[in-house]
Amino acid sequence: MRPHPNDHVVIIGGGIGGLLAAHALAGRFKRVTIIERDRYPSESSSLTPPPRRGVPQSRCVHLLMAAGAAAFEELMPGWSDEMGARGAGPFDASADTLLHFTAGGLPRSPSGITAYACSRTLLESVLRGGLAEKSTVQVRESQKVVGLLGDPLSERVIGVRTIGQHAAGAAILLADLVVDASGARSILPHWIAGLRDGVGSQLQMTVVESRTQYVSRWFHIESADAPDWHYCSVAPGIHTAFRSAMMLRAEENRWAVVLLAPADETPPCDDRSFAEFIADLGNRELQQAFGRAKPVSPVFRYGFTSNRMKHFNSLTTWPQGLVAIGDSVCTLDPYFGLGMTLSARGTVLLRKCLDQQGVSFFALDFQKKLAELNLEPWRLATGRELDGRPLAGRAHLRRLYDQAPSRPEVAHAVLAVQHLLRPAETLMEVAL
């Protein structure tokens, strides 16, 4: 598609959401500028993936659901091949996993549901590598956006104000479109409130606390000692004292273990407590694989988790030339692995709106469509509607989860919902 005349898009944030947005918009604007407040880590041969400053979860393994993987490939054709070449190939969400629900383990059988697990460092490196081939894209590291620039004669954002490190090098960047992809710590409502009408002051937000905390650690397992699965998960329940664990194969013989504990419990912090936590779960396969793993990092603690939805779609007015995507709008409990998928699907929607309506598309209409798209992952992560009501049909769904370990067709249906390949309400059609 040919770029619109005389246009420039500024993307706030160079994380997963911002890099995906650059892929989506590079062929639709003459210039794309990503403003990233931190610096990306250098490539390393260390067994521990290097973290990125300012992104605490860069130390944790990242799981990409099937719908997210499809959206990544749509936004960056060849992405899956590059991931495979870098040692993070796909795995079947049923045949290549050990998933233990409260009622038992799911049967391992081919499902056609493809997922990925890797370090955040690798994921960002692959996305940045794809952008390096696009001459119209510029990434400005160690730059910080400090506000929006509004047109005094219209309700429109026309750029951003930036500063460099140590508050040096203040500058103004004009843009036909500004995309906020700055993540969960976005202060976009504050910036909007600073514009002429202060509409950001009307913003409402829904918060559902998960009441869990988690820790993670990187391990190395020699290829000859590696299990025949990519992902093992033990769901929280009464029999595990509401604890949970995940072990995932990443790239370069790297494995990651993530442990989740209730909010009133002290999570593991050293070798002994880490091993005791896993032993107490009583899962033989997980314990055997863990016994062959050599720790190559400290134990990283991430604290409490929550789900947050900013209701930009409910504002009566919204400046043109501005959109918010990804965690800037909706932040989900990392346990469910839906965050990157939510960002990728939102970016695909943004590109579709641009293709259909051009750069002058109605920005508030996009935010409303994005809110509808985010509703399904919100329900999966919280088990609630936005107004706090429990989801309908919970008894039927509970019985399906109980039957999934003995019925592959039910297990595949449940997994398809978890990977956002089919709406949750379609599970009501699955016969008991």
Image (cartoon, helix red, strand yellow):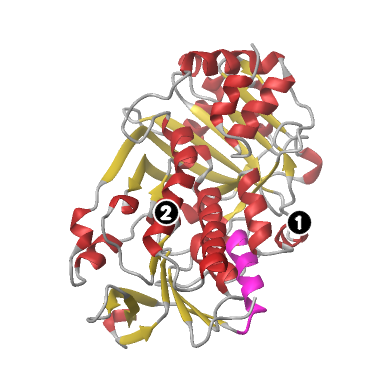
- From this view, report whether residue 182 is shown above or below residue 253: below
Give me the C-alpha separation between circle 1 and circle 2: 27 Å
- From this view, report whether residue 131 is shown above or below residue 325: below
Range covered by the magenta-colored residues? 122-135
Q: Find out whether residue 425 is within the magenta segment.
A: no
Where is mark 1, residue-wise? 84
Identity of the residue drawn at 63% across and 80% down: 2
Identity of the residue drawn at 32% across and 88% down: 169
Q: Secondary structure at mark 1?
A: helix
Label 1 crowd (10 A; few <14 / some 14-19 / many >=20) = few
Amino acid type shown at disc 1: Gly
Which percent across, then down, holds residue 207? 30, 40
Nearest the eye: 146 or 60: 146
Where is mark 2, residue-wise? 327
Label 2 crowd (10 A; few <14 / some 14-19 / many >=20) = many
Task: Determine the residue located farthest toward the front in the rendered image.
Answer: 357
Considering only order in the chain, which callout, 2 or 1, is on the residue closer to the N terminus?
1
Amino acid type shown at disc 2: Asp
Task: Tell me if residue 321 can be seen.
Answer: yes
- From this view, report whether residue 71 is shown above or below residue 158: above
Which percent across, then down, holds residue 421? 63, 39
Identity of the residue drawn at 71% across and 50% down: 253
Q: Secondary structure at mark 2?
A: helix
Most common secondary structure along the magenta stretch: helix
Nearest the eye: 359 or 415: 359
The quadrant of the image that shows the C terminus is top right
Which percent across, then down, holds residue 276? 51, 26
Give the numbered dot on residue 14: none
Please give left or right for residue 331 compared with residue 78 in the image. Answer: left
The quadrant of the image that shows the N terminus is bottom right
Dot in front, 1 or 2: 2
